[in-house]
Amino acid sequence: MVTHRFTVNIPNPTAQGVVVDLRLARVPGADLRTLALDAPELDLKVVSAGMTLDPCGVNGRERQEVKLQPYSSIDVHVVIVTAPADPAKGGAAAFHLSDHRGHSQTGGVMLACVERPGPEWAGKVIGTANPCPIAFATDPYAVSPGHDPSQRPAHTQIVLGTNVDLVAAITNPTPSRLDDVCVYLEHLGISDAQFTPITWNVGALDPREVFFAVWPVRVSGWMTGTFDGSIVVLSSRTEPVRLRSRLHIGREATGVSQG
Amino acid sequence: MAADLRITDGTPVWVSQSIIPSKDKVVSPGSSPTIAAITVNSTDIFVYVKVDNIGTVDVGACSCTAPVPAVWAIPVFFPGFLANPNGNATQTQAGVTFTASPAGDSLSGAVSYSFGVVASGRRAWAWSPDGRLFAHVASPNGADWYLTIVALQNITRSDGTVVSQGQAAVAGSNANGVWAGPPYWTNSNFGWAGSKAVLASGAYAGGGNALTRSLACPEAPGTNTWGELIPTFPGQIDWTYVTSPCGSVVAFVPKILQAIAGSRDAFLVSTATAKVVPFRQNNVAATVTIVGLNPSVTTLQHAAKGVRVNTGSGATIDVDDPDCTMVAGGGIVVAVDRVKASTLPTANLGVLPVGSATLGLLRVGQSQWVQVPNATGWANQSEQHWCLLAQAFTADGTTIPRPWNGQSVNPPPFPIAKQNCAQRNIAILP
């Protein structure tokens, strides 16, 4: 048997005392599959399920009433015991713990018991059938604020504590003109640099023509390293596409490369 | 016409299918990711948030929708003028009455403002073409002039500050001058250049062939008047001033009356900053040199290289449309936080930021997935059960304000009832 334990906080953020009616109900397997969870499709066999106020409790009830003082909360412990899953296929079971106050449901959480077969899923690249063909003419780089964005510095640096203009030189690599081209910066990865959201309306872009999109970036945080930002390009009659924008941020003493 | 965004709730509400933690690298914002399990050591998980535009306007598009082609317009001279200390005049527009009298000039009605006594009697005035502003020029002595522009409704400057209704957006203390005379200046020395600037131009008081010209920009912050003194070349070079269709810039364009004068460069003054800005081609500064008698500027499309300048001799050069090539702060911000799960989505149990990202353009009826990186990791504080809280709002902070700031001190409950807010339960495994 496998025991799944969940601790769920039941809060009362109001100035009045309240009686909370908690109900534990299994999510039907068919409903669970519609939620598109990262879980095996097979149902786990549930041996027992219940909630208790005892952190070490093993037996609980499917319905529990708790009284809460104003501005207080209590932890409820949900214990779900399942039969072992087929190691080759895994399985899943889920429960809704719903919260009823007065005569209505005021909230709830979903508790999922999952046994996965094999190693963790690594993720994949999800392509698109009709991608916008706009591409970088050169890797994105940074210039000093207000400087000519078409002049890529020989030794571009992004240094902590500075402001820069991030430049994305985009081009049309196809033999035909592209219309209604737009470009915007979606994010700078997990860096803590901040940027000014700007959408560039490039309009028509002829073959091999280059447009220099610019976003002011404030590197005022504390994170250094290599970060993968995302720049999105759009054109008419195509699907928008994310272009990876790799940038390196470092301290002044060590210098930084960009590209 | 209203902007409206939605992150669709789940059924039940705590399992929104529009918030998906995923390891996938999704090429197109139009494609859906697949959900991934999260562990405390995960570093490769994005939170994808699907945003729907359920309003009646495109979000992130340029707000300038002036029809094209559009020839850039010359300023409209102030229609109101008096040069008599004992003269009287009254004009009313949209509930605001301007009164000129020997006892002093003023606005009354929906807006009250006193311009004071005009000692010389010489004054000119005009409402802006869009009716949001009122401009008044007065002269204490005849040759001098002081320009005041009053906000007839709240005006947001380019730095986000607001000039309240009834306050001076441009004060005479930084918009003034002295011109040659007599004969002294008239209303034809002043004109509205679009609805975001007043152009003033007159003969230099110091003599010689020179003129001073200035542009007062009520939406610019700080000292919001640009000006210069330049030599004139009568019979050889003249100047025309034209405004972009949505008034973001005023172009100062020379007219080469005789070939002996050679050529001169045109330039732009931004009404958002009251500073000279360059023409641009594909966002690179470009020089526009005028060589002939009849230059003109026409917007052909609201995009890069969408403006055609006739250099006066028939030759043309295409430059970026200053009204629309760059749309700053016009998109959507998606912010994601997480809290320890409780049965109340509004309980704010230890709010941690996940990250934020932007969606630059979302047209009416469209839905797009925004890729939000996690900048703070997935530490679970020994509690596996967490809830992602996602919200979408406009980057300008005003069209659709940020519904909630979980990083503020004592944040209010997460407004799960708002349709631009949603949540999803997740497990962060050890």
Image (cartoon, coloured by chain):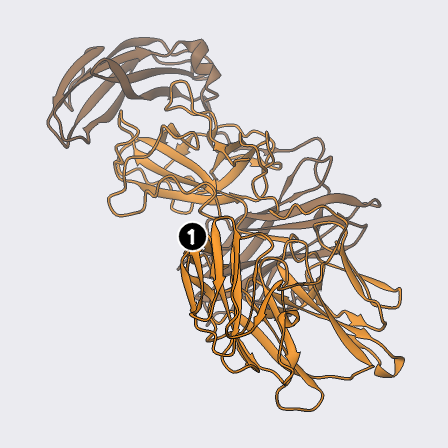
Chain colours: A brown, B orange
Image quadrant holding the N terminus of chain B, namely top right
- Return the x and y of residue A19 as percentages of the image width and height: 15, 18
In the current view of this chain or complex, which residue is farthest to the front? B86
Residue B179 found in image quarter: bottom right
Residue B43 visible? yes
Image quadrant holding the C terminus of chain B, namely top left
- Return the x and y of residue A207 as percentages of the image width and height: 81, 50
Return the chain for callout 1.
Answer: B
> Alpha-carbon neighbours of circle 1 within 10 Å: few (<14), some, or many (≥20)?
few
* Tag count: 1
Residue A3 visible? no
Residue type at tag 1: Gly
Q: Is residue A14 above or below residue B165?
A: above
B247 left or right, relative to B107: right
- Return the x and y of residue B138 as percentages of the image width and height: 52, 73
Q: Foreground residue, A216 or A153?
A: A216
Q: Secondary structure at mark 1?
A: strand
Q: Is residue B32 above or below residue B216?
A: above
Q: Which residue is mark 1?
A: B109
State the residue at coordinates (43%, 29%). B419
State the residue at coordinates (23%, 13%). A103
Q: Foreground residue, A40 or B341?
A: B341
State the residue at coordinates (52%, 35%). B2
Q: Is residue A145 above or below residue A122?
A: below
Q: Foreground residue, A213 or B27?
A: A213
Q: Is residue A160 above or below residue A131?
A: below
Residue B293 found in image quarter: bottom right
